[in-house]
Image: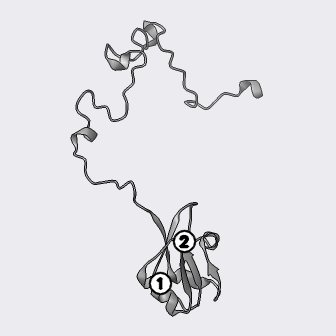
Amino acid sequence: MDLSHLRPATGAVKKRKRLGRGIGSGHGKTSGKGHKGRGSRSGGNTPPGYEGGQMPLARRLPKRGFHNPSREEFRIVNLGSLERFTAGSVIDLAILREAGLVRGKNKKVKILAQGELTKALTVKAHAFSQHAREKIVAAGGSVEVG
């Protein structure tokens, strides 16, 4: 046996379907597209959601809800996760990103009061919950909005 006798495993190679090559091929005449209609014609493909002319489901169902274009989305950081920083340090957006507490650029950050804070920190963020402000000030720290 040498390299000239090598063959692929049985069933590993499939013959190409040659469309429109005569009646004997089994794919002659209409080339497997059937008779007439959108699917048989050139460029005839159905878009997603097309239901054969029946009113599509997406159009049969009523619209619901409201999308507020002026809604502000905040990234949330809890007070308990600020405990890892050293006392007296200034916590801003860059430091929160480095620590992995905030992901994504140009995102606003809001500090919430979940967890305890025992160190005096200066925290800079776009927004604070009222309870979070009170806890930061009570721990001897300060709050800066901006």
In this rendering, is residue 104 above or below 61? below
User: In this rendering, would 85 be left or right of 107?
Assistant: right
Instruction: Read off the residue under disc 1.
Output: 133
Q: Is residue 1 visible?
A: no
Where is residue 2, by image quadrant? top right
The residue carrying mark 2 is 146
In this rendering, which labeled residue sits more in front, label 2 or label 1? 2
Residue type indicated by callout 2: Gly
Which residue is found at the position 75% from the left and 24% from the top?
4
Q: Secondary structure at mark 1?
A: helix
User: Residue 84 lies in what quarter of the image?
Assistant: bottom right
Q: Nearer the viewer, residue 125 or 78?
A: 125
Above or below for 106 versus 83? above
Marker count (numbered):
2
Please name the residue shown 42% across and 7% down the image. Answer: 23
Q: Nearer the viewer, residue 88 or 36?
A: 88
